[in-house]
Structure formats: structure tokens, C-alpha cells
């Protein structure tokens, strides 16, 4: 049994989601944070800030030996051991004879005085205050000075256990610069030498024990955290918004031949391409040429020819041919079995120059009965009406006749699409009304787009994306599935899949039809504006509720 992993995108993201935090943890806690001195400025504010209450003027009038301070300011510093090993006096990266471990420089300011305001443990006090002849005084290394015209605070080499900290409050005054100008940021000079256990000695060469001016995480760790968050968000986004389509439950190899409706062709063509992609490892092939779909009627004929050319056993079926039609197959076909797949939305389409966007059912009947021959008769532009229709046997034409042109109660005389007045649509006289027929939905849409005053009929998803045509509302109702389901939009038809006999179990035809009607192929049906039969109240009837 193979234990290999399929390295798809999700697998790579999953591995990185584990590796990145592991590496970040090792880097941060085993390498960087073993000895880490954290420091930051928690407050730096002027005593003369205008936002202070009037009673705060006493702060602005602070004196030193009788002299009023110039623009006094307060600074609060925090220093802590942000690593997991203790920091001792010898760890500070300063000469051994130098008792100061940290220096903080304040440009344009002089340090007037300072005091330790908070200690994480009382024992730290002895690093800052000593007793000499019973008098308390600052310890060595805890001092105030000047350097290059800038005030300096020196902090001693305090021994700090992991997590230990102290705070220092300082009072400063302006030394140089224009009154009212902002002071430059204080500058810390501090580092630890990075003494390590023997087993971590090799890390010293990498100079990883840097002191940081923050205490959250080192820059490499932050980068690792950002990468981790990116990986997690990417994987979550893909899971929620881009779900990978699973392969069919039973991929079957071989060659499948499809026939039938040009209106339903875009849906079936896309489903076939997707099935082949998912089942390529099984050798699935579904050839799709320009002449694959030639109409519902011709599709039934092609299916029967294929069945007759193969000597099937009694009760056997053809497993490599399927035909799709708009509505039930016309005529008597004793060897053909039918299965509803979805119901589809159709639309009448016009050339924009006709000047109409909606027609009543009666207007449509009057147009196809030739009572109206000019678009001005129905409120449009003064152009002759040209009827572009599909040949007899077309499902969209049959649905137009049954659901739009004729009264459902059968009380009115039965109407049909008029016979063509020319053999080729190109021969129509553009100044006179006329009618022609075409052999496929793409040609239908092309001819309507090319001919001012033309009207035709098409499957809705194709009509919605075809350039140069306008889908019509019927009785002011737009072509939508909701309209068909509440009975306000009449032009739709059930799409059927036909096979020659029962599809043999394990055939590519059975596998593809199952993918289309019961598995993820249903999503493709929905994408093209169809309602899968399995989602209707009575799937074997497959009609709007």
C-alpha cells in the first residue's frame, strides 16, 4: 500500500500551517528569547500641554534651585527581561568596569531628575539605591549626564529573572531647539551579550540574541506569525468560497457521444468538459465538435441510427450515446428511453432597433399569426417584422408553440410558427416583413443581431450573453425561474436525456448521467439558469410547482 501524499494546494497549505508555527516557536523561544532585554518608553509628555486643566499650571512652573524649568516634560521608561533565561550583570554588553548597562539619550533636552517608580520585586531596589553613612544615594550606574548636547539617563546592570521589570520616571527640560517644537524620540543603547548553554553555543555565531524595544515578539517571529495567519486565512477562504469540486463517485473510462438540443448545448458541453477533466485518469473521452449538437429532432435520429448499427442483446442498451432534447421527443421511438434532467428557461429575443422590451402574449400571437407585420403596430419603431425561427423538431420552437402561441385551454384556433418565405435568412428583404429558419441556437442569435426588426427564440442563458439581442419580457414579466415557478412567465421547457435502451451499469453513459443529475454536475445546471429535476417536488415530472 502506498503511503505517498498527493501534493495538491490544500495539502501544501496544511503542511505550511504546521511548519510555520513550529519554526516560529523554536526561533522565538529556543533561539531569540533565551536572553532578551525588553525596553520601551511608556510615556513622554510635556508638562505644559494645553490639554491639561488650569490647575496643572503648577507642573509647568517646576523649579530647580529656584530656577523655573524650560518646557518641562515627563518620561516613563520600562525595562524588563523578555526572555526565558535570567539576565545577570555580566550579560550586559558594556565594559566590565562600567556599572551602567543601559543608556537612554534625549536630544534637545536635559535630565533634571529621576526616580524608580515601580519594581516587580522589592529586592531590585538595591541596584538603584545604596546607603552611605546612613544616607540613601543613587547606586553606581544609576546616573544623570549629558553627551553631545543631549541629556542621558544611565540605568544600572540590574539582575533580572524572566518576566521581572522596573520603571523609571524622569523630569526633563528643553536644552535646545525652538520653543513648542516636538522633541525627538528617546534613543536606547542596550544589548545583552547572549551567553548560552553549551548545546546552544553554535547559535552565538548567528547573533540572534538581539535586544528589542518591544516585548511582544522578534521581527522573525512576527514574520512567521503573519505567514501563518496568511496561510490559515487563505485555506479558510478557499474552503468557504472556492470549494474544490470532488470527482464523480464512479469515474468510468471510454468514449461517450452526445447529441441533441443546440439550446441546451452550452450546459451539456460544459458538464462534459468538466467530467473529462475529473475523470482523465480513467481515460474518459467526450468528443465535442461543431456538429456535435444539431437539434433535438436530429439528436433522436442520431441516437436511433447508433443503436441500430450495434447488435445489442435482447434487453440490452447502448452505453456510449446520449441525446438531449427540449421537451419530450416527437414521434414514436420504441427503443428510446427518456429521463428528465432539468427544466430550462427560454426567451424571445429581438434586435434592439425594434424598439420594444416587452410584449403581451396577445401581441406575440398577433405577430406570429401575421396580424402585426410592423413593430409600430405594438408600440415599437417603424420597421418590418422579420421572424427568425428554428426548423421543425426544435425544442425551443415546440415550446414557443405550446406555451406561448396557443391558449392552454385550447379555446382559440391553434397557431404555429409561419412557414419560411425564403430559403436563406440573408435573402430577406429588409424593407418588407418575412420569415426564415435556421438550424441552431447560435445561428439564430447571430441572425437576429444582424437584422433590424428581427425576432427569434432561444435558451435564456445564451440569450442573456449574446451580443446585439434583447431578451423580451412577456406580459411585463422578465424571464426568470421564479416567474416560471409562480406561473407568471410562460416560456420554459423540461430538458430530457434519451438513451437507446437502458444504460448498462458501469458504462460511461450511466456514469456521466449520474454525475449530471445526482452529483456535482447539478451545479453546472444551476449556473446556466436551469432547475435540476431532483430539486423539484415531483422529479419524474420535472415541472415548475
Image: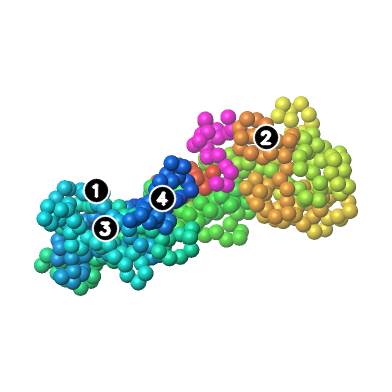
Residue extent of the magenta highlight: 527-545
Question: How far apart are the two marked residues, 2 and 1, measured between alpha carbons?
Answer: 79 Å
How much space separates mark 2 and mark 4, taking CA atoms? 85 Å
How far separated are the C-alphas under marks 4 and 3? 34 Å
Tell us which disc is closer to us: 4 or 3. 4
- Lower position in the chain sequence, tag 4 or tag 3: 3
Asked if marks 4 and 3 touch (Cβ < 8 Å), the reply is: no
Q: Which residue is mark 1?
A: 118
CA separation, marks 1 and 3?
16 Å
Ranked by sequence position, the earlier of labels 2 and 4 is 4
Write down the quadrant of residue 372 in the picture: top right
Neighbor class of circle 4 (other Cα within 10 Å; few <14, some 14-19, many 20+) is: some
Q: Is residue 235 visible?
A: no
Looking at the image, residue 358 sits to the left or right of residue 539; the answer is: right
Q: Secondary structure at mark 3?
A: strand
- Dot 1 falls on a residue whose secondary structure is strand
- Specify few, some or many for label 1: CA neighbours under 10 Å numbering under 14, 14-19, or 20 or more: some
x, y (%) of residue 146? 31, 67
Report x, y in % for residue 337.
52, 41
Q: Which tag is nearer the camera, tag 2 or tag 1?
A: 1
Amino acid at each position: 500500500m502506498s503511503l505517498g501524499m498527493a501534493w495538491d494546494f490544500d495539502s501544501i497549505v496544511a503542511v505550511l500551517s504546521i511548519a510555520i508555527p513550529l519554526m516560529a516557536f523554536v526561533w522565538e523561544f529556543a533561539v531569540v528569547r533565551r536572553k532578551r532585554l525588553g525596553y520601551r518608553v511608556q510615556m513622554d509628555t510635556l508638562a505644559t500641554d494645553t490639554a491639561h486643566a488650569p490647575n496643572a499650571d503648577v507642573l509647568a512652573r517646576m523649579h530647580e534651585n529656584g530656577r523655573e524649568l524650560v518646557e518641562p516634560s515627563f518620561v516613563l521608561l520600562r525595562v524588563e527581561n523578555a526572555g526565558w533565561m535570567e539576565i545577570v550583570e555580566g550579560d550586559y554588553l558594556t565594559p566590565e568596569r562600567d556599572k551602567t548597562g543601559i543608556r537612554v539619550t534625549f536630544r534637545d533636552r536635559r535630565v533634571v531628575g529621576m526616580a524608580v517608580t515601580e519594581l516587580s520585586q522589592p529586592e531590585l531596589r538595591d541596584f538603584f539605591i545604596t546607603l552611605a553613612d546612613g544616607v540613601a544615594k543613587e547606586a553606581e550606574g544609576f546616573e544623570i549626564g549629558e553627551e553631545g548636547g543631549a541629556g542621558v539617563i544611565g540605568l544600572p546592570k540590574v539582575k533580572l529573572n524572566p518576566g521581572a521589570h522596573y520603571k523609571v520616571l524622569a523630569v526633563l527640560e528643553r536644552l535646545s531647539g525652538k520653543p513648542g517644537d516636538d522633541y525627538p524620540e528617546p534613543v536606547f543603547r542596550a544589548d545583552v551579550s547572549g551567553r548560552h548553554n553549551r548545546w546552544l553555543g553554535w547559535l552565538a555565531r548567528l547573533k540572534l540574541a538581539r535586544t528589542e524595544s518591544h516585548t511582544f515578539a522578534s521581527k522573525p517571529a512576527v514574520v512567521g506569525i503573519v505567514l501563518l495567519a496568511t496561510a490559515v486565512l487563505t485555506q479558510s477562504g478557499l474552503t468557504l468560497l472556492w470549494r474544490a469540486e470532488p470527482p464523480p463517485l464512479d469515474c468510468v473510462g471510454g468514449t461517450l457521444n452526445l447529441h441533441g438540443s443546440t439550446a441546451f448545448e452550452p450546459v451539456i458541453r460544459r458538464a462534459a468538459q468538466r467530467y473529462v477533466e475529473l475523470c482523465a485518469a480513467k481515460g474518459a473521452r467526450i468528443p465535442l465538435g461543431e456538429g456535435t449538437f444539431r437539434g433535438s429532432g436530429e439528436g433522436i435520429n442520431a441516437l436511433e441510427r447508433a443503436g441500430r448499427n450495434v447488435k445489442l442483446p435482447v434487453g440490452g442498451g447502448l452505453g456510449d450515446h446520449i441525446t438531449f432534447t427540449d421537451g419530450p421527443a416527437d414521434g414514436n421511438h420504441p427503443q428510446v428511453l427518456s429521463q428528465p434532467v432539468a427544466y430550462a428557461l427560454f426567451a424571445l429575443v429581438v434586435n434592439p432597433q425594434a424598439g420594444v422590451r416587452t410584449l403581451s402574449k396577445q401581441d406575440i400571437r398577433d405577430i406570429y399569426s401575421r396580424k402585426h407585420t410592423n413593430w409600430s403596430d405594438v408600440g415599437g419603431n417603424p420597421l418590418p417584422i422579420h421572424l427568425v425561427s428554428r426548423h421543425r423538431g426544435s425544442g425551443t420552437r415546440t415550446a414557443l408553440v405550446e406555451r406561448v402561441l396557443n391558449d392552454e385551454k385550447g379555446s382559440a384556433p391553434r397557431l404555429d410558427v409561419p412557414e419560411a418565405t425564403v430559403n436563406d435568412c440573408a435573402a430577406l428583404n429588409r424593407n418588407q416583413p418575412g420569415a426564415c429558419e435556421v438550424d441552431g441556437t447560435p445561428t439564430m442569435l447571430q441572425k437576429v443581431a444582424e437584422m433590424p426588426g428581427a425576432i427569434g427564440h432561444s435558451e435564456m442563458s445564451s440569450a442573456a450573453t449574446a451580443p446585439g439581442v434583447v431578451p423580451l419580457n412577456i406580459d411585463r414579466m422578465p424571464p426568470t425561474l421564479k416567474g416560471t415557478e409562480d406561473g407568471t412567465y410562460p416560456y420554459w421547457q423540461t430538458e430530457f436525456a434519451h438513451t437507446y435502451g437502458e444504460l448498462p451499469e458501469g458504462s460511461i453513459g450511466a456514469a456521466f448521467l449520474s454525475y449530471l443529475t445526482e452529483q456535482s454536475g447539478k451545479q453546472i445546471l444551476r449556473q446556466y439558469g436551469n432547475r435540476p429535476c431532483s430539486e423539484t417536488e415531483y422529479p419524474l415530472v420535472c415541472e415548475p410547482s
